[in-house]
Image (cartoon, coloured by chain):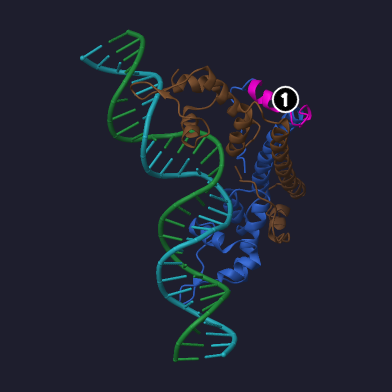
Chain colours: A brown, B blue, C cyan, D green
DNA sequence: CTAAAGCTTCCCATCATGGGAAGGTCAACA
DNA sequence: TGTTGACCTTCCCATGATGGGAAGCTTTAG
């Protein structure tokens, strides 16, 4: 199986498969005589695992640890759970931050009549709300 | 006022102030004979505005538009509101995505006893849950 | 044989932010 | 006066996950 078929089978783009190989998240695959990467069923399972972990928002570093645990039959489930709980705490914090932003913005927008006049509580809020010294932990905007 | 005092007064780091100048979000400041940036009260207001907009999760591009509207006394509040609503929709989507991740992960973790044994529903879930073809819109992991 | 599709590597871009180097400036203090 | 330390300047590089695209080679179908 070439990298394109692998991408289709795993849901991970060819670009990303190469990247994961370069950073050592997955081992280097076998190569054809022409240098094409060659994959088997086992690789599909590993990449699907990665894809699902990404879908749950795990970082590639955490996924590396999850893969190690997955392949270690003598792991303790406690280790896995610890990792998952840490990620859960992270998700919760991000949700809290985003929700706080949303609530503030909803409040500002609610009072903005949104017509042709220039008076705008949203701009007023941005111009006058006190700056929280340390600021919220900012999410990347996209 | 030098850039350090400006950073303290506005809550925006000196590094970022220079960056915002370079990308044209704020105009170039006056300079002392030695080339030091010199700021006044008006600049403090503008940078605080930027800081607060960042705290609400607006992108720098959106902030540029907000600044334009802020400085345009003939703006319509409708334009501001449209921008805010767009950002609100964005926030809501990100919250939804993160919440979906959290809920899935909570379900997996709930069934993991987290002791010394290797059996782990979290890893099992990652290894067997079907891959959603297009996947969720992924948040950057941090 | 040729054209298209697929593969390779390599470099660059995103977005907001920060780290750090190399070097100039300014204030205070002995 | 000289020195020290805090502050400023510009410039380059890094982050994290992903994608775009170029230049060039291989494979496959017609």
What residue sits 58% from the left and 35% below the top? A64
Query: B112 or B8: nearer the eye?
Result: B112
Whether residue A52 is visible here, answered yes or no, is: no
Residue B100's x, y, as percent? 71, 31
Judge from the rendering whether residue B54 lies leftward or rightward of residue D17; answer left or right: right
Q: Is residue B124 magenta?
A: yes
Judge from the rendering whether residue A46 lies leftward or rightward of residue B101; answer left or right: left
In which quarter of the view is residue B113 placed? top right
Residue numbers of the magenta segment: B110-129
Residue B18's x, y, as percent? 52, 62
Pointer 1 chain: B
Query: B30 or A73: nearer the eye?
Result: A73
Which corner quadrant holds the N terminus of chain A? Answer: top left
* Residue on which the image places disc 1: B121
Q: Secondary structure at mark 1?
A: helix
Query: A87 or B22: nearer the eye?
Result: A87
Residue B2's x, y, as percent? 56, 72
Which corner quadrant holds the C terminus of chain A? Answer: top right
What residue sits 60% from the left and 40% below the top? B140
**Vertical relation: C1 (above or below) B121:** above
Q: Is residue A13 magenta?
A: no
**Vertical relation: A115 (above or below) B5:** above
**Vertical relation: A103 (above or below) D4:** above
**Vertical relation: A7 (above or below) B41:** above
Residue A56's x, y, as percent? 66, 32
Whether residue A35 is visible here, answered yes or no, is: yes
In which quarter of the view is residue A118 placed? bottom right
């Amino acid at each position: 199986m070439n990298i394109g078929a692998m991408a289709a089978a795993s849901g991970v783009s060819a670009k990303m498969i190469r990247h994961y190989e370069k950073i050592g998240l997955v081992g280097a695959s076998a190569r054809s005589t022409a240098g094409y990467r060659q994959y088997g069923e086992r690789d599909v399972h590993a990449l699907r695992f990665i894809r699902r972990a990404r879908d749950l928002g795990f970082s590639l570093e955490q996924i590396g640890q999850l893969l190690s645990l997955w392949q270690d039959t003598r792991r303790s489930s406690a280790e896995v759970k610890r990792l998952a709980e840490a990620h859960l705490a992270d998700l919760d914090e991000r949700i809290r931050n985003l929700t706080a932003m949303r609530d503030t913005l909803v409040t500002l927008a609610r009072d903005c009549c949104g017509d042709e006049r220039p008076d705008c509580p949203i701009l007023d809020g941005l111009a006058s709300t006190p700056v929280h010294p340390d600021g919220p932990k900012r999410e990347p905007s996209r």
